Image (cartoon, helix red, strand yellow):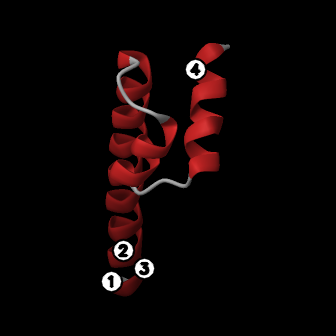
């Protein structure tokens, strides 16, 4: 049982980190100061992921 709880805790932490990174990318896109390639390089996201976030932000 303890292993399952620890795994759930680690998963929650990873989800929080990913959510924070997504928010940062969205802010970078909104600022309009960075090329998509720069955002991908800085954030660690793939270029396709950044393009996807940009497309969703435009909706």
- Marks 2, 4: nearer the viewer: 4
Q: CA distance from mark 2 to mark 4?
A: 35 Å
Q: Which residue is mark 2?
A: 5
Relative depth, front residue between 28 and 21: 28
Tell me which label, 1 or 4, sits earlier in the chain: 1
Residue 19 image-quadrant placement:
top left
Q: Is residue 52 above or below residue 40?
A: above
Element at label 3? helix
Q: Which residue is mark 3?
A: 4
Q: CA distance from mark 3 to mark 1?
A: 5 Å
Q: Which residue is mark 4?
A: 57
Residue drawn at 48 percent across, 53 percent down: 45
Query: Around disc 3, counting alpha carbons within 10 Å, would you say few (fewer than 14), some (14 to 19), or many (20 or more)?
Result: few
Relative depth, front residue between 45 and 32: 32
Q: CA distance from mark 2 to mark 3?
A: 4 Å
Element at label 4? helix
Residue 58 image-quadrant placement:
top right
Q: CA distance from mark 1 to mark 4?
A: 40 Å
Q: Position of residue 26 (x, y in %)?
A: 43, 28
The answer to whether marks 3 and 1 mark residues whose Cβ atoms lie closer than 8 Å is yes
Residue drawn at 64 percent across, 48 percent down: 48
The answer to whether marks 2 and 3 mark residues whose Cβ atoms lie closer than 8 Å is yes
Residue drawn at 41 percent across, 65 percent down: 11
Element at label 2? helix
Q: CA distance from mark 2 to mark 1?
A: 5 Å
The answer to whether marks 2 and 1 mark residues whose Cβ atoms lie closer than 8 Å is yes
């Amino acid at each position: 049982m303890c292993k399952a709880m620890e795994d759930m805790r680690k998963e929650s932490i990873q989800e929080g980190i990913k959510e924070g990174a997504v928010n940062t990318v969205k802010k970078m896109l909104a600022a309009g100061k960075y090329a998509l390639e720069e955002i991908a390089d800085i954030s660690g996201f793939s270029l396709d992921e950044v393009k996807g976030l940009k497309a969703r932000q435009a909706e």
